Amino acid sequence: ERFDRLRFVELKHGRISMLAFLGNIITRAGVHLGGSIDRAGDSFDSFPNGWAAVSGPDSIPTAGLVQMIAFVGLLELGVMKDVTGENEFIGDFRNGAIDFGWDTFDEETQYIKRGVELNNGRA
């Protein structure tokens, strides 16, 4: 039971780290969402990249940071868990809705892919 909980947390933190790294690389490459981020007309690319987006003279307003933290909290409490009890392994958040072809892989390939995800999250 304790090992399963630790593995669950390790997978989740690894996924968050991989997404954060990818987001950082993409924004530093100059790719930003189009449109305005607020009613004042500020665009997504008007804010700096990296830590400067959180603290500094041109940082995201406090209300925006509070919204992001609240959204992450919502994901943590309501989405990123096994809601239906249909998970096949620790860290399976498909909840019977999303597949993306996972069930088409044989068992050995699934083990390999799960190991690759675990190792990438540790890197």
Image (spheres, rainbow, N blue to C red):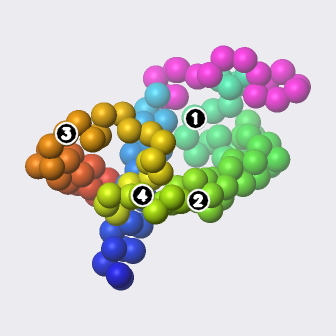
Give the magenta range.
Answer: 27-42
Q: Position of residue 121 (x, y in %)?
A: 32, 53
Q: Position of residue 85 (x, y in %)?
A: 46, 62
30 inside magenta stretch:
yes
> Which numbered disc, 1 or 3, marks the residue closer to the eye?
3
Q: Position of residue 41 (x, y in %)?
A: 84, 21
Query: Are circles 4 and 2 on residues that touch, CB within 8 Å?
Result: no
Image quarter of the N terminus = bottom left
Q: CA distance from mark 4 to mark 2?
A: 18 Å
Q: CA distance from mark 2 to mark 1?
A: 25 Å
> Which numbered disc, 3 or 2, marks the residue closer to the eye?
3
Query: Are circles 4 and 1 on residues that touch, CB within 8 Å?
Result: no
Q: Residues within 10 Å of mark 4 (few under 14, many from 20)?
A: few
Note whether residue 19 is visible: yes
In the image, what residue type sits under mark 3? Phe
Mark 1, secondary structure of its residue: loop
**Closer to the camera, 62 or 114?**
114
Q: Which numbered circle lies on residue 49? A: 1
Residue designated by label 2: 76
In the image, what residue type sits under mark 2? Glu
Residue designated by label 4: 86
Q: CA distance from mark 4 to mark 1?
A: 39 Å
> Which numbered disc, 3 or 4, marks the residue closer to the eye?
4
11 inside magenta stretch:
no
**Closer to the camera, 34 or 72?**
72
Q: CA distance from mark 1 to mark 3?
A: 38 Å
Q: Earlier in the sequence, mark 4 or mark 2?
A: 2
Q: CA distance from mark 3 to mark 2?
A: 28 Å
- Identify the residue at image location x=33%, y=68%: 7
